[in-house]
Amino acid sequence: MKSNSINKLGFYLTMLSSRYGNGEYFIEMKINFKSGTKSFPATVKKDGEELVLTFSGAKQPFSWEKLSDIAKDYDAMQLVYKERGTDAIINADDRNVTLRYDDIAPIEKNTTATVGERQYLIAPPKANDLLKEIGIMGQNGKIKNDMIRKYNQIDHFVELIADYLKKLDGKIEVLDCACGKSYLSFALNYYLKDVLKKDCHVTGVDYSEIVIEASKKSAKNLGYTNMTFVKADLTTYKVERKPDVVISLHACDTATDMAIGAAINAGAKAIFAVPCCHKELLSQYSYEPFAPLLKYGIFKARQADLLTDSLRCLLLEASGYSVTAQEYISPVETPKNLLIKAFKDGNNRKKATREYFELKKMLGITPKLETLIKLEAE
Ligand SMILES: C[S@@+](CC[C@H](N)C(=O)[O-])C[C@H]1O[C@@H](n2cnc3c(N)ncnc32)[C@H](O)[C@@H]1O
């Protein structure tokens, strides 16, 4: 190729090298040098922190300048730079040198993939590698029957918070408390990075070694270096990276309080929690005027659930968050279908604190969350 094209190619390669940054989202480069009708393929892959060029059957350390040097000896070249969510494609010959980006476009409702009636954000075929790795899709490319509910749950969770995520700037730090096998962490990480193209880091915490090791393995297989998984009990876990967004999906019993408590104490901007089973208040609360109603065990239990979650919301308000609670997903998917959304804005603090302490006195209870946070006195 002539010097004009080589110079322009060099310019585009410089753009790609700054896009590469620390390589967090890089997958690989595939290059085809052409001479007449013959093709000479090359690849660039990560080996630890280094990039390695494989060309003409030999491996060598990669440098961006080297590609321009090799291109000088050929008539044309095509380079496909693959990173999560985007392919950058350079076509170069003596007539023209072009760079274009093929993106996973932010998915609008009417363009999502569907399984049955549902439209998905974490959608095949682009998300196939992810869905296969986390066990939602079989190797045959079909969603596994026994994983459809899980798929619905994580995809819908992401959908319900997507509008908020779209508004966030800068690098987004996410903490998933009681992450289990991290289905939701992986889905959110994919949506933030691959679909919305936002810089992010996701930490998953769980006290089960098995699920943390499985999550680490999946992240490694997918090449997701922006995810960290920590085996820790939330009772004693100290947040290592200040989270912007804290999520928890079906964190058992008081683990939901620990997730909310960790988020409040770390000053997280937003908290999205779908609580799980509730055991704590059932044996604690009594309210004499309701005694004739609460003599029925099932009503007492349901009332305890309601109290637990509504007091969580009130404590969030008392801690400077504005709060909404909504149905998370159809009860057919899971009976644990409440989503608490909290956004730090400091509005209702005093009123909520007063209301909380009045209720606490009336019911004779000390919910777990109260013991995990510092409430400012009025
Ligand atoms: C029902 S699973 C939900 C997992 C995941 N969030 C999901 O929706 O697939 C509950 C998880 O909470 C974890 N867990 C419960 N109490 C915990 C605690 N105190 N500290 C850390 N993890 C906890 C369990 O190990 C389990 O993986």
Image (spheres, grey):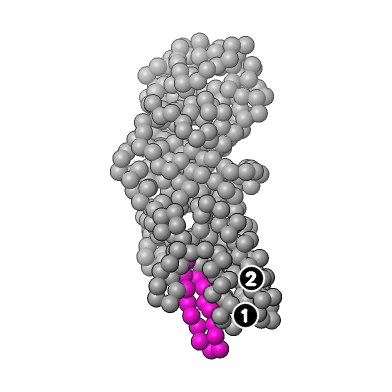
Position of the C terminus, as image quadrant, is top right
* Residue range highlighted in magenta: 30-44
Position of residue 114 measured from the top left corner of the image (x, y, whole percent): 52, 61
Give the camera-side residue of 348 and 344: 344
Check disc 1 and give the amino acid type: Met
Q: Nearer the viewer, residue 222 or 367?
A: 222
Q: Secondary structure at mark 2?
A: helix
On screen, residue 260 above or below 173: above
Q: Identify the main secondary structure in magenta.
A: strand
Q: Which quarter of the figure has residue 80?
A: bottom right
The three-letter code of the residue at mark 2 reads Leu
Q: Residue furthest left?
A: 210
Residue located beneath label 2 in the image: 9
Question: Label 1 belongs to which residue?
Answer: 1
Would residue 352 be found to the left or right of residue 210 on screen? right
Task: Work out whether 313 lies above or below 101.
Answer: above
Residue at screen point 32% across, 38% down: 208
Q: Residue 43 lies in magenta, yes or no?
A: yes
Q: Position of residue 120 (x, y in %)?
A: 53, 57
